[in-house]
Amino acid sequence: MAGPTTTTTLTWTRELQFDARSANAALVLDGKGIAGPSPVDALAAALAGCMAIDVVDIVTKGRHELRGLEATLSGERAADPPRRFLRVTLHFVVTGAVPAAAMDRALQLSRDKYCSVWHSLRQDIEMTTTYEVRP
């Protein structure tokens, strides 16, 4: 049985800019990264967002006191076209009384089971996740 279908429509507006629309959201993609994120920046945001959403969901379902979360993704890309991601580091800064074991579990579950963006990328991309918890 197939899962849900995702549809996105891009409409060229000018230069390297496109209006991108999905069922419930819209944004501008810009190949120059000026009027909106470039496709690669959007991909990086999608990966960071997917894992951040998983972490918030898993940690809060574990009834830990999460008061804030910030995720920063840094990606190293190949020098030559297609300049794909070779490795990414995703660092989380968590605010609240969240035990290290809960963060380790949330990150592992996101990476191994839940993050559809990560599982849609090439699996030879090296990924490192780090975090710090601030009271």
Image: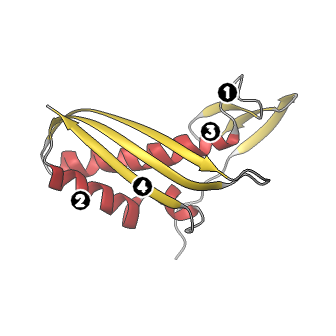
Q: CA distance from mark 2 to mark 1?
A: 34 Å
Above or below, 135 against 48 in this view is above
Dot 1 falls on a residue whose secondary structure is loop
Look at mark 1 in the image and give the residue it sits on. Answer: 36
| Image location of residue 35, percent across then percent down | 71, 22
For the point 62% across and 38% down, the residue is 41
Q: Where does the C terminus fall, quadrant-wise?
A: top left
In the rendered image, the vertical position of residue 94 relative to residue 8, given as above or below: above
First of labels 4, 2 by sequence position:
2
Q: Earlier in the sequence, mark 2 or mark 1?
A: 1
Q: State the residue position of label 2.
A: 105
Front in this rendered view, residue 8 or 104: 104
Q: Can you identify the residue that label 4 sits on?
A: 128
- Give the residue at mark 3: 41
What residue lies at 20% left-to-right and 45% top-to-bottom? 60
Closer to the chain start, of discs 4 and 3, is: 3
- Using the numbered discs, state the Cα–Cα distance from disc 4 to disc 2 in whole angstroms: 15 Å
Mark 4, other Cα within 10 Å: few <14 / some 14–19 / many ≥20 = few
- Label 3, label 2: how far apart the Cα atoms are: 27 Å
**Label 1 to label 4, Cα distance in Å?**
27 Å
The furthest residue to the front: 79
Q: Taking 14 as reference, is 78 above or below it?
A: below
Q: Nearer the viewer, mark 4 or mark 2?
A: 4
